[in-house]
Image (tube, helix red, strand yellow):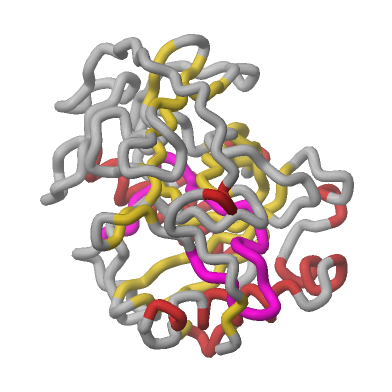
Amino acid sequence: MNSILKNQSVFRTCFVRYSSTYKTTVVGKPFTATHRVFIERDGKVVSPFHDIPLYANEEKNVFNMVVEIPRWTNAKVEIATKEKFNPLKQDVKKGKPRFVRNCFPYKGYIWNYGALPQTWEDPSEVHVETKAGGDNDPIDVIEIGEAIATQGEVKQVKVLGVLAMLDEGETDWKVLAIDTKDPIASKVNDVKDVETFYPGLLDATRQWFKVYKVPDGKPENAFAFDGECKDKEYALSVVAETHEAWKKLVYGKAQTDLDIQNTCVVDSPKRIETESISGESNVIVKEEEATGYDPKWYFV
């Protein structure tokens, strides 16, 4: 696997200290179509898609993860890939902010959920094993540690494995990871360790992804590899492939309708200066009280 990573093309980006501090600036009322969560690094607005490095420590295979959805919450929040600075926003369907349903026995998302920056699942590239193109987003991450994350948090994680979900004809990789600061992170190093220390979690994860759209009238999702969670080595190769795809994207070598403006990628055609974001929201809204939230348990 190290040879796979070493053979990837080199690109230049801003120097980012491992100790760089990320914070969020919130604009608009939560759980509405105008709500945005911008990411700042050392006081400057950055893109969580393009400006946060994929690697926190490349030598040790430690990755940065942008948390979109904390565990036990339902709001379907994602990086706004078509907006300047790619803030986090809640997905909107038919004009209404989207919440995933509670499919028995689960409540909301059962892990911290987010994305790896500087990755892209290229829809024009049909994967040789999944037989489907990418979903046009950064690669998704499931973080299984004990701490409940906060939205917009940038965690340092290590990769454990990967599931290949097939969502409406697209490959939608789900990288399994754990926070490097988790109390048992040193013991959990590959997918087999997940079975040991988190018995039942992989089965629950497959079932969750299989049925979570069913209450909205959509079919069950399927998986490549008969639902097998591939191991760490395979997962690292998938991450490396999506990182290479992102390089093509950010350097303008791929056809896209995504916003590739960034503040850090040297020689990229859409590199810009950072801007200040004003209008921080102090409005606090409980998710359970938001318009469109559905407390019902669905038996599917």
Q: Is residue 13 above or below residue 276?
A: below
At a point 66% along the width and 57% down the height, the residue shown is 72
Q: Quadrant of the C terminus?
A: bottom right
Q: Is residue 120 left or right of residue 283?
A: left
**Residue 77 seen anywhere in this rendered image of the structure:** yes
223 versus 81 height, above or below: below
Q: Quadrant of residue 275?
A: top left
Position above or below: 253 against 293: above
Percent across and percent down for residue 166 are 39, 78
Could you say which is closer to the camera, residue 186 or residue 110? 110
Q: Is residue 86 magenta?
A: no
Q: How many marks?
A: 0
Residue at left 73%, top 63%?
Answer: 190
Specify whether 224 is left or right of 285: left
Q: Is residue 183 left or right of residue 127?
A: right
Q: Which image quadrant: the N terminus?
A: bottom right
- Residue 65 visible to an observer of this rendering: no
Judge whether 298 appears above or below 241 on screen: below
**Which secondary structure is most common in the magenta stretch?**
loop
Residue drawn where x is 49% and y is 53% of the image:
75
The quadrant holding residue 188 is bottom right
Q: x, y (%) of residue 114?
A: 52, 49
Q: Nearer the viewer, residue 205 or 35?
A: 35
Residue 204 quadrant: bottom right
Q: Which residues are magenta?
A: 100-122
